[in-house]
Image (cartoon, rainbow, N blue to C red):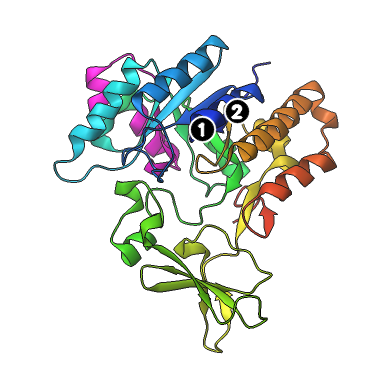
Amino acid sequence: MKKIELICPAGNLPSLKAAIDSGADVVYTGFNDATNARNFEGLNFTHDELREGIDYVHKRGKKVYLAVNTFPQMDTYPQWYKSVDNAVKLNADALILANLGILKYARDKYPHVNVHLSVQASSSNYESINFYKKHFAIKRVVLPRVLTVHEIKDLRAKTDVELEVFALGGLCINIEGRCYLSSFVTGASTNTEGACSPSRFVRFINTGVRGKEDSKLRITLNSVVLNELGSSETSPYPTCCKGRYTNEDGNYVYAFEEPESLNVLEIIPKIIGAGVDALKIEGRQRTKAYVTAMTKVLREAVDSYYANPDGFRVKEDWLEKTNATFEGSKPTLGCYVEK
């Protein structure tokens, strides 16, 4: 029986090594510029760093997938072309692409390169997936987090393109590649700059007297207040969708979504049974400790399933480790069970 791939995030060299050493089959990465959708300061790879990382991975018989999955504007496309060229020169095992123009460039110039369709392309039906296969010979699609297991199973029956799904980590309520909330507030688009709520627009402001019960931590994005936290409260990364806003009664409420984290451990048999080819952990912007812990948990869970599919059970320590490191207040199955 062919096992699904376990694909883990690598926002820097220590995380890349930690993922591989903890059981990842593949790490996914990006260059430290606007050509990838996790373009945060201090993250991602220079050309030389990625050369070292790919060498480390390949010596251990594993793979590196490299994301060039944002959308160039006007005459900025040469930078995206350069990232494609560099990824091929560095011998990345697959390019994760989203934009039609970049897909065409990669396929025309490198007809034999392995191309995956990024989640940023937001392709969630078989006609769309098969279109990308016909015109760009994609081998795999990373599905947006909007489909049920039943829908994924139906896709499997109607396309032979490999299917990759998210298993652990952040949950985006907006269809990937189609969110403009950050753009409205900051003028900087997630889809073009690669960072949702870029840090240069985020401010943390102490109000009142620190240590007093009425003191607050106010979090703003540009001029918009995303949250005000009491001394005992915590917050996820300050994005518009996870903001807590004032309602008509003057109370702070989560208008879009409660801060939750995706955790599919309990339905791994259903997801594998739907015919997916890979499980992916979100989190290139997270710590080495997070990458290590989540990779080990999912590696053990997947191996446990294949060792005894009918007797698969979620272990308590898996839940303890995932819940302890997650962003948000509670785990969720997202749309996998119901919408």
Relative to residue 126, is residue 280 drawn left or right? right
What secondary structure is marked by label 1? loop
Horizontal arrangement in the rendering, residue 205 relative to residue 303 (left or right): left
Quarter holding the C terminus is bottom right
- Give the residue furthest to the left: 75
In terms of depth relative to the viewer, which is nearer, 325 or 204? 204
Region rendered in magenta: 104-133
Q: Is residue 240 left or right of residue 321?
A: left
Residues under numbered marks 2 and 1 in contact, where contact means CB atoms less than 8 Å apart? yes
Residue at image position (84%, 43%) is: 316
Q: Measuring 45% from the left and 25% from the top, which residue is drawn there? A: 65
Tell me the residue that label 2 is attached to. Answer: 19
Query: Residue at horizontal 63%, vertical 83%?
Result: 214
Question: Image quarter for residue 197?
Answer: bottom left
Could you say where residue 266 lies in the image, as x and y percent from the top left? 75, 42
User: In the image, what residue type sits under mark 2?
Assistant: Ala
Q: Secondary structure at mark 2?
A: helix
Mark pair 2, 1: CA separation: 7 Å
Q: Residue at x 37, y 22 (%)?
A: 48
What type is the residue that disc 1 sits on?
Answer: Ala
- Residue 289: give x, y in percent of width and height: 64, 38
- Is residue 112 found inside the magenta-colored segment of the image? yes
Q: Which residue is mark 1?
A: 10
Q: Give the answer, above or below, for where 338 lies relative to 54.
A: below
- Tell which of 179 and 132 is nearer to you: 179
Residue 256, position in %: x, y? 52, 67
What numbered label is drawn on residue 236?
A: none
